[in-house]
Amino acid sequence: MKTGIERREFLKLAGIGSVVFASGLMGMNGLGHAATPAQDDFFFVQMSDTHWGFNNPAVNPEAGTTLQKAVAAVNALARQPDFIIFTGDLTHTTDDEQVRRKRLGEFREIVGALKVKNVRFMPGEHDAGLDNGKAYQELFGETHYAFEHKGVHFIVLDNVSNPGSTIGDAQLQWFAAELGKIDKKAPLVIFTHRPLFDLAPDWDWHTRDGAKALEMLKPFTNNVTVFYGHIHQVNHHEADGIKHNSAMGLMYPLPAPGSVPIKAPLPWTPSQPFKGLGFRGVDAGKDRAYALTEYPLKGE
Amino acid sequence: MRGITIPLLVALLFAVCTVAMTASPALAQQDEQVVTVTAKQYEFSPQTITVKKGTPVVLELTSLDRLHGFSCPALKLRSDIPPGKTTTVRFVPDKVGTFPFHCDNFCGSGHEHMIGTITVTE
Ligand SMILES: [Cu+2]
């Protein structure tokens, strides 16, 4: 979306980071909101599906440096984000537990070079699906948690630490309790790895008990945005007033849902290195609208 | 009281018998088509299953290594396939076509390739 870029250009021109911004984004804010306190405005970055350890030169001959490039690209942003969130598949699957730990450790070391130190993580099924999140938890801690930032509630849900792509009853109970603490009118952002809705059940692009979580979110209608990964491409979906946004991946793109029989990674395009890979900036404010800026990963 | 109790008991017995009959895999109906499917990292065998519309099908699923899953969303079929036992899935195909199925329990590096199709003919 253009709005996010315009906004940051405007902030840059204004020479200050926290001026009140007036945009026509989704028709929700605008000049009428010019009185909103400046501190409500913030910016975060979503990085996803870095698949550290992936090795297939036909798909990504630069697999060993793609994550470092992404880190450098985020560090080079004119406006540094308030925080960065990785929405899962930090590493690529291995059946070897030792290799899994090694990859998770290497990933952590590489992203340690991010200038922003407020970095949040969650696992993908590649990190946690084979050992119920054991190795992930050793290195990164809890797989589901909640936090607050400038009046926005964020909840990280784990729908991967179980091979069957479920959130599970215990976590759903925790989720209900967290939701119980939140004002139904307050803006709420959910981070997951897999989509909570049935995007493409034939490709396992869903959460088996996702409907239970979505049901719990109904009282929050029009205040909820979900950011997820897993599908390695941008997809927007809105249902029951909940906006679902997937992100590009940072190792290989995947085909559009249901477009081909097998969801194999798309091959590398030599004339367009890193095509389809990137991260996104999210401009957030109390207006509950999020301006998304997609940053493609470039070859240089 | 007795007049009420006896019919209730009969009804209960009847209910138990009905449940037992439908739940028992041993009592396969004669016109059922039995298809044996094995799952292992990272393939199903067979990968293509052909059945007939209207003829009841029994899928007998076995895993040779670890937990896999069998999911065919178009036909609303799904089951876990734990190793060490045979899992039975029964259905009556009610539409003609080719419907993909896949393993839906993340099982390792080749998980994405554990797919197949059910073809329902007229
Ligand atoms: Cu499997």
Image: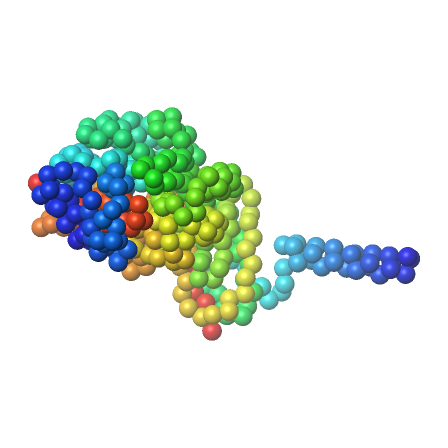
Image location of residue A148, percent across then percent down:
35, 36
Nearest the eye: B6 or A63: B6
Tell me what residue is drawn at x 16 percent, y 34 percent.
A75
* Observer able to see residue A278: no
Image location of residue A272, percent across then percent down:
11, 49
In this figure, what is the number of numbered marks?
A: 0
Quadrant including the C terminus of chain A: top left
Image location of residue A73, percent across then percent down:
15, 38
Tell me what residue is drawn at x 38 percent, y 28 percent.
A141
Image location of residue A43, percent across then percent down:
23, 41
Nearest the eye: B63 or A199: A199
Nearest the eye: A298 or B20: A298
* Observer able to see residue A29: yes
Q: Left or right: A111 with respect to A237?
A: left
Q: How is the image coloured?
A: rainbow
Tell me what residue is drawn at x 25 percent, y 50 percent.
A33
Residue lying farthest to the right in this orientation:
B2
Tell me what residue is drawn at x 12 percent, y 46 percent.
A10
Residue lying farthest to the bottom in this orientation:
B122
Q: Left or right: A39 with respect to B38?
A: left
Nearest the eye: A4 or A232: A4
